[in-house]
Structure formats: C-alpha cells, structure tokens
C-alpha cells in the first residue's frame, strides 16, 4: 500500500491529511482487493462484496476509487488509468458512466450506495452513518437527460420500491454531468396516468 498527502482536508483548514492508496487487481470479472488492511477498510465503508479472501468491487466503485486517488489497479504489470477503466466498464455495461456519475455524486455527499434491486440504473442508498446499522432508506434510479420512460413503467417501479418501505428517488444526469434528484410518490404518478 502507498500513502500520499493531500494539501487540504475536508474541513478546509489547510492541514494535510494522509490518504492510503489501496492496491487492486483487474480480471475479466472486474476489480478486486486481496490485501487484508485495504479490504477491511473498504468493506467497513460500504465498498464491494466479500467473496472468500477477495473484496470484489463493482465497476462504478472502482471508477470512483481510481478517480479519488484511493485505488491503484493493475492488470498484469500495467496500471489501469481512469480512462482504461471507463472503457472496460462501458464494454460490460452501457450504463456504466451513468452509474459512476450518480455513485460519485452520492458518495461525495456522504451517502453509502450499494447495488439496487434490478430496476435498471439503481442504488440502495443509506443515510449518513447508517450503513451496516439500518437498512437502506432510499432507492435511487438513474436516468440520462433525454432518455424516455413511460409513466406506466415509472409507476410500476415506484410502487415496488414503496412496497419495500424505501423512498423512491430519480436521479437525472444533465448534459454537463450534473446530477439532479427528484422524489417521486405513487400519488403524483397516479395523477399523471389519469391526466388526458
């Protein structure tokens, strides 16, 4: 593992903080961590899924950790750049960039986001400080600006999410990559379905 210093910490008081850079490997199935300290640190913070002695990362998690400088991934002897990882991810999932943008935004706001329930681009989102303590409070579904979805399909997803006891939220990715969040309720969608 490597360490590097950042010039400013999150408090903005100008004090340096040391950030541990974790080493990972890339296989055709995605990135994984085997080092015990890196694995446990990431797992505690809600990253990846443990499989035996490995911590398997989702592509959007890998992208985020490379983007933030927390992870150095190798394939063979080559170091994987952010661009390399984006290319790898898009070959596996055409929505990889959308997932990354939403994931990055949620993480930067202090939320833990995990793979969703199969509603497309969706995440289970835990309130700050509640990962591992309480179940996810929200399900965030992503849409790229300009992508169409029928009210019927949206209503079906919102209904299923609501029945799980989660708050449905739609994250819309604007053309500049900015993420805008909208809370959705069954009642409002019902009104849309009945409007001529």
Image: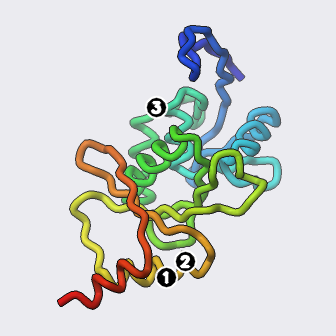
Residue at figure coordinates x 70%, y 42% from the top left? 45
Q: Secondary structure at mark 1?
A: helix
Position of residue 177 measured from the top left corner of the image (x, y, whole percent): 31, 44
Q: Position of residue 175 (x, y in %)?
A: 23, 48
Dot label at residue 37: none
Q: Check disc 1 and report the residue beneath it.
A: 159
Q: Earlier in the sequence, mark 3 or mark 1?
A: 3
- The residue that disc 3 covers is 81
For the point 52% across and 33% down, the residue is 66
Instruction: Say above or below: 43 vs 13.
Output: below
Q: Give the total of numbered labels.
A: 3
Q: Quadrant of the N terminus?
A: top right
> Where residue 30 appears, x then y in whole percent?
57, 50
Q: Nearer the viewer, mark 3 or mark 2?
A: 2
Is 78 on the left-hand or right-hand side of 192?
right
What residue is pinned by disc 2?
Answer: 162
Answer few, some or many: residues within 10 Å of disc 2's Cα (few below 14, many 20 plus, some between 14 and 19): some
Q: Quadrant of residue 20?
A: top right
Query: Which mark is nearer the camera, 3 or 1?
Result: 1
- Residue 35's place in the image compared with 96, above or below, is above
Q: Are marks 2 and 1 in contact (CB under 8 Å)?
A: yes
Q: Between marks 3 and 1, how big is the CA–CA gap?
A: 40 Å
| Res 184 → quadrant | bottom left
């Amino acid at each position: 593992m490597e360490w590097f210093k950042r010039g400013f910490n999150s408090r903005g008081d100008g004090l340096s903080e040391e950030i541990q850079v974790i080493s990972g490997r890339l296989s055709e199935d995605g990135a994984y961590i085997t080092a015990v300290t890196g694995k446990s640190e990431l797992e505690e913070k809600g990253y990846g899924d443990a499989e035996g002695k490995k911590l398997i990362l989702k592509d959007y998690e890998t992208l985020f950790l490379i983007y933030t400088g927390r992870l150095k991934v190798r394939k063979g002897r080559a170091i994987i750049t952010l661009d390399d990882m984006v290319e790898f991810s898009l070959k596996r999932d055409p929505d990889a960039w959308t997932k990354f943008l939403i994931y990055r935004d949620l993480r930067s706001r202090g939320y833990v986001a995990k793979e969703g329930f199969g509603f497309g681009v969706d995440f289970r989102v835990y309130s700050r400080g509640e990962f591992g303590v309480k179940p996810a409070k929200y399900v965030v579904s992503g849409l790229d600006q300009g992508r169409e979805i029928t009210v019927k399909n949206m209503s079906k997803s919102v209904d299923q999410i609501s029945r799980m006891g989660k708050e449905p939220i739609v994250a819309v990715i604007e053309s500049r990559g900015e993420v805008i969040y909208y809370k959705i309720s069954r009642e409002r969608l019902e009104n849309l379905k009945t409007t001529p």
